[in-house]
Amino acid sequence: MTYFRALDPFPLESADHTTLHEFYTRLGAGTLTTTKCRGCGRSAWPPRGFCAECGAAAFDWVDLASEGTVHAFTVQETGLPAGFEAPRVFAIVKVDGHRVFTVLTGAEPAALRVGQRVRLAPLRVADDPKGNPRWLPAFEVV
């Protein structure tokens, strides 16, 4: 079977495809992490393989809180990528000073409010071509 990347909206998460594979491994275990530069000490979201501030390529993985607050959100009912059911709530969630673009699962759109507390609930999406699980950061309302 041929694998058509253009039809697959999800990231390839294995070490064969990204230096940030540790992020996805930890996310699959239920932990949200990011990178912290060994040069200047800044953490970044999304995780990066080099520091945008000082250019260093050495970093450590740091865990972020498992809860945050809704900074902004939108509800999409049509035109969703393959594998997503409507309505889908996309949000920016504040976690440890970072703004994380994410999906809110199990959210009632009419009841959502800016400032509402949410908890990490990683979303398993379509497995990669080798059958390995893949994850996206997602949150649920507390």
Image: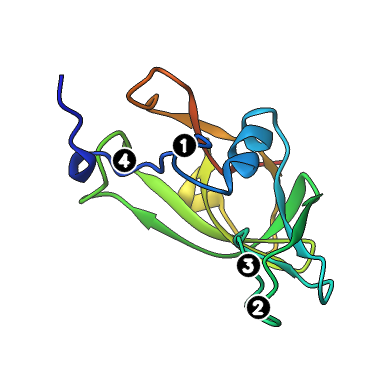
Pointers 3 and 4 in contact (CB under 8 A)? no
Q: Is residue 121 visible?
A: no
Quadrant of residue 26 within the rendered picture: top right
The front one of 99 and 127 is: 127
The front one of 95 and 57 is: 57
Residue drawn at x 19%, y 45% as measured from the top left? 6
Is 31 situated left or right of 137 in this image? right
Amino acid at circle 1: Asp
Q: Which residue is mark 3?
A: 50
Which mark sits nearer the N-terminus, 2 or 1? 1
Disc 1 to disc 3, how far (Cα)?
A: 18 Å
| Up/down of 87 relative to 59, above or below | above
Task: Give x and y (percent) for residue 10.
Answer: 37, 41
Q: Which residue is mark 4?
A: 86
Q: Nearer the viewer, mark 4 or mark 1?
A: 1
Disc 2 to disc 3, how far (Cα)?
A: 6 Å
Quadrant of residue 115 within the rendered picture: bottom right
Pointers 2 and 3 in contact (CB under 8 A)? yes
Q: What's the mark number on residue 16?
A: 1
Amino acid at circle 2: Gly
Q: What's the mark number on residue 89?
A: none
Amino acid at circle 3: Phe
Mark 4 residue element: loop
The front one of 106 and 130 is: 130
Is 108 situated left or right of 45 in this image? left
Is 105 situated left or right of 25 in this image? left
